[in-house]
Amino acid sequence: MVSYIKGIVAQINENHIVLDNHGIGYQIQMPLSSMYSLKEGEEVTVHTYMAFGKDDISLCGFVSRSELEMFKLLLKVSGIGPKGALNILSGVNVDTLKMAIASGDDKLIAASKGISAKTAQKIIVELKGKVNKELLSGGINVTLPTSNEDTRVSEAISAVVATGFDRTSCVRALANIEITENMTVDEIIDLIFANITF
């Protein structure tokens, strides 16, 4: 099992990166929340999970251990596979997701691509006890704002893609953008348009 890979970000694509480790390019699927924080050419350590499908084996990667642990927790929910877990983590950060589960906010979870209201409710039912236990033990900061950077970026990318641009170009544009707490979705959209290369 591969626990992590340290290397140079060779490519940033629509839903995965290629990480160059001593001349070997590892294709690693990542949530948007991890991908937009990376830049091509930089050296990073990516925490990995090897997913075994019916027809293939893929590597899923994360920039933080907490994101990896949340991914593995989501996989324990019946009906949630690697793709679904990655989609959820693309739209919301780990701490906000935990708060959503603890408070029963199925709408926030269902806002993720490919996640139905029924599936969101199932996630809450199956994980609420585990998440509540972590919150009570002081595992995360429970005073997080409801509006978070990951959601704003995800919404901005979806809006730009709706105008005809591909998601890969949006992700690459974000690699050159510093997102601040005060930025609105519209401001992030403008920055994506300004940095998209053809």
Image (spheres, rainbow, N blue to C red):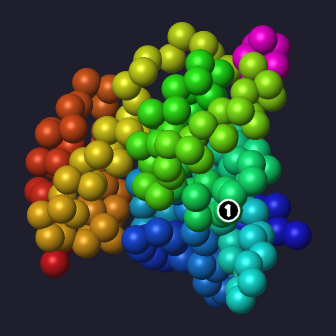
Question: Residue at image x 66%, y 63%?
Answer: 82
Residue extending furthest right? Answer: 1
Front position in the image: 182 or 108? 108
Front position in the image: 16 or 100? 100
Front position in the image: 198 or 189? 189
- Say which amino acid is labelled 1: Gly
Q: Which residues are magenta?
A: 133-139
Question: Residue at image x 25%, y 24%?
Answer: 182
- Rendered location of residue 185, percent (x, y): 21, 38
Front position in the image: 87 or 121? 121
24 up-or-down from 177: above or below? below
Quadrant assignment, res 66: top right
106 up-or-down from 174: above or below? above
Q: Is residue 84 visible?
A: yes
Q: Secondary structure at mark 1?
A: loop
Q: Is residue 118 left or right of residue 157?
A: right
- Rendered location of residue 197, percent (x, y): 18, 72
117 up-or-down from 129: above or below? below
Q: Is residue 94 visible?
A: no
- Name the residue tied to disc 1: 81
- Rendered location of residue 151, percent (x, y): 38, 39
Report the quarter where the N terminus lies: bottom right
Q: Is residue 15 left or right of residue 81?
A: left
In magenta stretch: residue 134? yes
Counting other residues with Cα less than 10 Å from the Cα at mark 1, is it few (<14), some (14-19), or many (20 or more)? some
Q: Is residue 153 left or right of residue 4?
A: left
